[in-house]
């Protein structure tokens, strides 16, 4: 029976089409379209025990240039269509990153992690103040205050220490024997909290910054209601109070990257309007970037590719 069917089978005619791959730089889909800057941000976010992260001169220069945009607050959005602009995105990225990290120069090695059996689980129920200044990773305890104090002072008189919301004002190469570092600001996510909660808050911050600033955001909101998310972002951009946009926040409650960070920094009674606007600017870009990528592909694609797509 099989031999009969084999003899009566029809030959397979394969249709081939020469469809070329269209090269598009992934930086086109990034909030910060400079590869070295994204790499520097990802490196700075590797600090898990609040220890300073040593940077290369290239990383330090890229982050220092980014810090110059902190003070370039964009003008309020008026009526009409809201579209993300490169300068606004650089301001938003600078404000968000330097709200949690600062830059500096030091000649000291990071303080070693300490073995502490009483605090090995990262929590200290008996002393809330102590638990707020200790952290653990991989079963090793580290004194956060000691790590911060060791790197807070510059080693050169003409190199001021970085402050919240900015970087060290260093125009020339680092002095001999010094190396640049990115330093997490211990109190940026709260004070007097248990170490477990502090770690979870820092994870939320690092996850959001890594996704939105260190990686391309293409497809970040794929499969979600981008119309509602964009409407929320526009409300956040134009609002001056949390109450003006809080009821629209349900649009991102299912977004694992956006919702925890928005709850952490953008929904309190003392929320800074510029912080919520910076977050909203990133949301707007993430909602629009897929359409921008599609239009860029169609602009570069050869006729054979677009014709094959329509079949």
Image: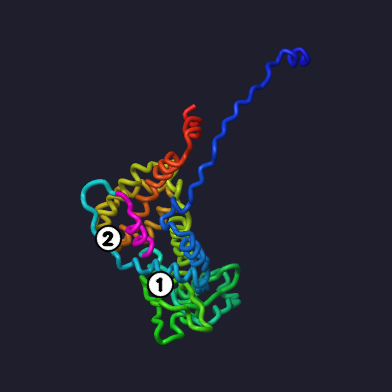
Report, in whole angstroms, how far the alpha carbon at label 1 lies from the one at label 2: 27 Å
Closest to the observer: 157 or 146?
Answer: 157
Q: Secondary structure at mark 1?
A: helix
> Dot 2, how many residues are within 10 Å of its Cα: few (below 14), some (14-19), or many (20+)?
few
Closest to the observer: 298 or 130?
Answer: 298
Task: Tell me: 33 left or right of 236.
Answer: right
Provide the major secondary structure of the magenta segment: helix
Q: Is residue 87 magenta?
A: yes
The quarter holding residue 137 reads bottom right
Residue linked to disc 1: 187
Measured as percent of width and height from the top left, residue 204 is found at: 45, 60
Circle on res. 74: 2
Residue 288 drawn above or below residue 55: above
> Dot 1, how many residues are within 10 Å of its Cα: few (below 14), some (14-19), or many (20+)?
few
Comes first in the chain, label 1 or label 2: 2
Segment tinted magenta in the rendering:
83-94
Q: Secondary structure at mark 2?
A: loop
Circle on res. 144: none
Q: Is residue 267 visible?
A: no
Residue 45 drawn above or below residue 77: below
């Amino acid at each position: 029976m099989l031999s009969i069917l084999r003899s009566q089978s029809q030959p397979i005619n394969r249709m081939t089409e020469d469809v070329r791959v269209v090269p598009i730089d992934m930086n086109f889909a990034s909030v910060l379209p400079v590869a070295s800057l994204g790499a520097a941000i990802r490196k700075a976010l590797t600090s898990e025990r609040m220890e300073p992260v040593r940077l290369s001169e290239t990383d330090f220069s890229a982050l220092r240039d980014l810090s110059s945009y902190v003070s370039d607050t964009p003008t309020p959005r008026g009526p009409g269509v809201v579209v993300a602009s490169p300068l606004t995105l650089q301001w938003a990225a600078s404000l968000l990153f330097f709200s949690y990290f600062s830059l500096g120069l030091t000649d000291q090695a990071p303080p070693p992690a300490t073995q502490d059996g009483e605090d090995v689980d990262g929590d200290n129920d008996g002393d809330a103040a102590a638990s707020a200044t200790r952290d653990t990773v991989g079963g090793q305890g580290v004194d956060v205050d000691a790590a911060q104090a060791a790197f807070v002072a510059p080693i050169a008189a003409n190199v001021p220490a970085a402050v919240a919301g900015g970087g060290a004002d260093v125009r020339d190469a680092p002095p001999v024997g010094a190396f640049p570092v990115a330093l997490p600001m211990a109190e940026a996510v709260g004070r007097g909290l248990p170490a477990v909660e502090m770690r979870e808050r820092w994870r939320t911050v690092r996850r959001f910054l890594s996704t939105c600033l260190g990686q391309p955001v293409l497809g970040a909101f794929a499969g979600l209601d981008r119309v509602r998310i964009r409407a929320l972002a526009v409300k956040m951009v134009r609002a001056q109070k949390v109450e003006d946009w809080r009821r629209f926040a349900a649009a991102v409650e299912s977004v694992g990257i956006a919702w925890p960070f928005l709850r952490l920094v953008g929904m309190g009674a003392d929320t800074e309007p510029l912080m919520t606007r910076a977050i909203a600017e990133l949301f707007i870009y993430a909602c629009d970037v897929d359409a921008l990528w599609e239009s860029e592909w169609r602009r570069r694609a050869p006729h054979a590719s677009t014709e094959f797509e329509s079949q």
